[in-house]
Amino acid sequence: MQTDTSSTARLRHDPLVRGLGWLSALLGVPQVAAPEGFARALGVDGDFRHRAATTAVGVRELAAAAGLLGRPHPVWLWSRVGGDVMDLTMLTRALKNHDGRGFSRTVAATAAVSALTVTDVYAAVTRTRRSSPMELTGATTVARPPDEAYALWRDLERLPDFMAHLEEVRVISPGITHWRATAPFGKTVEWDAETTQEVAGRLIAWRSVEGADVDNSGEVRFVPAPGGRGTEIRVTLRYDLPGGALGEALARYFGEEPHQQLDDDLRRFKQIAEIGEVVRSEGAPGGKRARGEFPQRPARPLTEDELKEALA
């Protein structure tokens, strides 16, 4: 008998995956057993076309249930996402061509499927082991000599003061630190890192050790700015973004654009280096709340309507 892979074993005991499997079963059985009644419960009539569509959706749900509960794999989660898109398309068409009877039930069903789609996308992205290598670069100039800028960054436990995604950096032993950070979709990731290269006043480089939730590495260079105008901070970060290219796109959609995050972190570092604190207005929240309530976005030109409003 073939043994389970580690991925299958992990998903088999995942509460969210099992919950979605049982949900597929609970939805699939009545759609196959009583398609006309299920269609009417959604606010649409029970003609042949709607009965056939309901039965087909029920068969799809039962197949997903068998996969998620029997031999779970991310492909079954992505099949649910694809099914959600199909269901939303059919419900949207039903709303557009509705005769008015049972309209509120169809609206409620559409809202429920929309909420379920978000859950399915979250489950599929976060349970997919595939990852996309990413490299970020950023730079800023601070009005401090290299030794002082280096010393400020070298105090690793202070990194969360200006790196908004970091919750904690803790020194475990010389050259080894433990990191905890927020990730897209409200997840938390942790890892241990080792310092791989260090030149006082010039360079700090590190990489995660085996067992990290997200493999990553990076370096910070401290270069004298031209004309004695301080220090250029040049940062390079490399990591594997969970969920592959789709995970990257979804993270960007939900306000987790990595390049913008790095630019914001460097802006805050510059403020701490030059004036000792991150500048905020009196009405703005502090700490991690600022990141959640006021997510940053890359700069963009004003739209035509926004320009008219600004000029008015």
Image: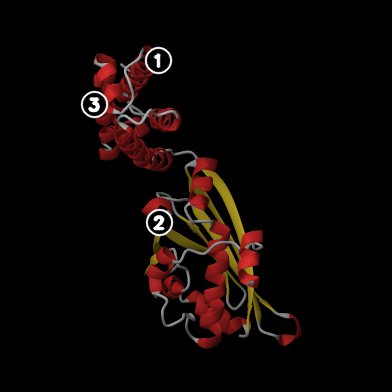
Relative vertical location of residue 106 with respect to residue 173 in this rendering, above or below? above
Q: Please state which of the two labelled residues, at mark 1 or mark 2, is closer to the viewer.
A: 1
Marks 3 and 2, Cα distance to the nearest angstrom? 39 Å
Q: Residue 298 location in percent, x, y?
A: 59, 62
Q: Secondary structure at mark 2?
A: strand
Circles 3 and 2 in contact, beta carbons < 8 Å: no
- Residue closest to the eye, 242 or 23: 23
* Residue under the image location 41 percent in, 32 percent down: 95
10 Å crowding of disc 3: few (<14), some (14-19), many (20+): some
User: In this figure, which residue is indicated by the disc labeled 3?
Assistant: 26
Q: Nearer the viewer, residue 114 or 207?
A: 114
Which of labels 1 and 3 is toward the front? 1
Residue 198 in the image: state x and y as whole percent.
Answer: 56, 70
Residue 303 seen from this side: no
The quarter of the picture where residue 205 lies is bottom right
For label 2, the crowd category at 10 Å Cα-Cα, with few meaning under 14, some 14 to 19 and many 20 or more, is many
Q: Residue furthest top?
A: 48
* CA gap, disc 1 and disc 2: 53 Å
The label on residue 191 is 2
Amino acid type at circle 2 is Trp
Q: Quadrant of residue 193?
A: bottom left
Residue holding disc 1: 49
The image shows residue 267 at horizontal and vertical percentages of 56, 74
Query: Going 37% across and 33% down the picture, which residue do you hit?
Result: 7
| Closer to the camera in the image, 46 or 142 | 46
Task: Indicate the amino acid at tag 1.
Answer: Arg
Lower sequence index among marks 1 and 2: 1
